[in-house]
C-alpha cells in the first residue's frame, strides 16, 4: 500500500467516502411528536446532516421541508406505509414527498393481507405465507412503476421476521427474487438481521446491488436469535455488530444512505443515545 493509500484508509469511514451520517427520526419519536423543530435542531447540533423520516408526522410536505430547512437538515428518504399511503392517492403522496426532497420511499413493513387484518402484529407475522410475500413483491413492483415516473424510488425495510424459514427460503429472499431490481430497492436493517441470527455482512455480499440504504443499528451480545420482533438494543459501537467489517461490506454492496436507528427501551435519554452513536460513527475507521 502506498503512503497515500495508507493515509486514506486511516481516515474515518464516512469522511473517506464523503458520506453524511444520518438518523432515522423514529429514534427520537416521542421527542419529535412533542417538538419537531426542537428534535430536528437537536440532531443537527450533534452533527447529523440528514434525516430519514418515519412518515409525514401530521405535516404537509411543505411544512416538513420548512422544519428541515430551519435545522439545516436534508431528507432524501422516508418511510411510508403500504396501507393508507401506497395503496391510496399516490399523486397526492408524490406531491408531499417531492416538496420535502425525497428520492426514496421505503415501505417499513409488509402489506398485511385482508384475511389477517384486525389481529395482533406478532400473530400476523407468524402467519404470513410464501404467497403473501409474493403478493408484497407484486405490490412493490406495481407502485414502484408509478413512483418512478416522478423520480422517486420505492423500497422495503426488513425486521427479523422476514428471515423466518418458509421451506427452503424466507420472506425476504422471496421479496428479493420477485421484485424488479430496476424499480425496487431495499433498506437493510442490520440490527434486525443480527437479531435473526444472520450475518449482515455476508447477506450484503450475497445480494450486491439490491440494497441502497441501511439502518445502522446495534444490539447487545445477549440478544437471542429470533424471528419475533425481539432484540436487546444499544448504542452503535456498544453492542455485538462488527462495524469495521460491516460498513465496508455495505458500501461494496451499493449502500450510500446510512441512518442510525435505535429501538426502545433506552438506557438513557434518546438524544444522548443518538450522540453516542454519532460520535462512534464519526470516528470509526473501516
Image: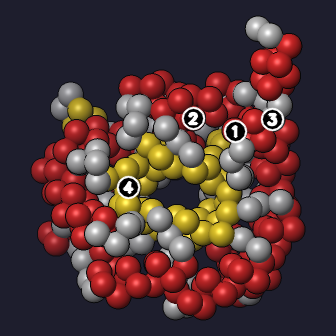
Q: On the rendered image, what quadrant is the N terminus found in? A: top right
Dots 2, 4 in contact, CB < 8 A = no
Task: Bin the neighbour count of mark 1 within 10 Å (Cα to Cα): few under 14, some 14-19, many 20 and up.
Answer: few
Instruction: Calculate the distance from the C-alpha at mark 4 to the C-alpha at mark 1.
Output: 25 Å
Dots 3, 4 in contact, CB < 8 A = no
User: What residue occupies the far top of the structure in this picture?
Assistant: 1
The residue indicated by pointer 3 is 12
Q: Which mark is residue 251?
A: 2
Left-right relation of 281 to 209: right
Residue occupying image coordinates x 68% and y 57% = 22
Q: How many marks?
A: 4
Of labels 3 and 4, earlier in sequence is: 3
Task: Bin the neighbour count of mark 3 within 10 Å (Cα to Cα): few under 14, some 14-19, many 20 and up.
Answer: some
Residue occupying image coordinates x 71% and y 52% = 21
The residue indicated by pointer 1 is 17
Dots 2, 1 in contact, CB < 8 A = yes
Dots 4, 1 in contact, CB < 8 A = no
Residue 170 position, x and y percent, is 27, 38
Residue occupying image coordinates x 66% and y 43% = 218
Of labels 4 and 1, earlier in sequence is: 1
Where is residue 27, by image quadrant?
A: bottom right
Give the number of the mark in front: 2 or 4.
Answer: 2
Instruction: Calculate the distance from the C-alpha at mark 1 to the C-alpha at mark 3.
Output: 9 Å
Where is residue 108, by image quadrant?
A: bottom left
Amino acid at each position: 500500500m502506498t503512503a497515500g493509500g495508507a493515509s486514506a484508509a486511516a481516515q474515518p469511514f464516512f469522511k473517506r467516502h464523503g458520506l453524511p451520517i444520518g438518523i432515522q427520526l423514529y429514534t427520537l419519536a416521542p421527542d419529535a411528536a412533542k417538538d419537531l423543530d426542537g428534535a430536528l435542531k437537536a440532531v443537527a447540533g450533534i452533527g447529523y446532516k440528514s434525516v430519514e423520516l418515519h412518515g409525514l408526522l401530521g405535516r404537509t410536505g411543505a411544512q416538513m421541508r420548512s422544519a428541515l430547512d430551519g435545522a439545516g437538515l436534508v431528507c432524501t428518504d422516508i418511510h411510508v406505509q403500504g396501507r393508507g399511503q401506497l395503496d391510496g392517492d399516490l399523486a397526492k403522496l408524490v406531491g408531499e414527498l417531492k416538496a420535502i426532497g425525497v428520492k426514496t420511499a421505503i415501505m417499513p413493513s409488509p402489506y398485511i393481507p385482508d384475511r389477517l387484518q384486525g389481529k395482533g402484529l406478532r400473530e400476523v407475522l407468524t402467519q404470513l405465507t410464501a404467497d403473501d410475500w409474493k403478493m408484497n413483491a407484486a405490490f412493490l413492483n406495481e407502485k414502484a412503476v408509478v413512483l418512478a415516473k416522478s423520480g422517486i424510488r420505492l423500497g422495503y425495510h426488513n425486521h427479523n421476521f422476514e428471515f423466518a424459514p418458509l421451506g427452503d427460503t424466507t420472506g425476504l429472499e422471496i421479496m428479493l427474487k420477485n421484485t424488479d431490481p430496476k424499480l425496487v430497492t431495499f433498506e437493510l436493517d442490520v440490527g434486525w438481521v443480527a437479531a435473526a441470527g444472520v450475518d449482515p455482512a455476508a447477506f450484503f455480499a450475497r445480494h450486491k446491488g439490491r440494497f441502497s440504504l441501511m439502518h445502522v443499528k446495534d444490539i447487545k451480545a445477549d440478544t437471542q436469535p429470533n424471528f419475533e420482533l425481539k432484540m436487546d438494543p444499544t448504542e452503535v459501537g456498544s453492542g455485538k455488530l462488527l462495524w469495521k467489517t460491516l460498513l465496508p461490506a455495505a458500501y461494496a454492496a451499493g449502500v450510500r444512505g446510512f441512518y442510525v436507528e435505535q429501538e426502545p427501551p433506552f438506557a438513557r435519554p434518546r438524544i444522548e443515545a443518538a450522540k453516542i452513536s454519532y460520535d462512534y460513527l464519526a470516528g470509526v475507521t473501516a
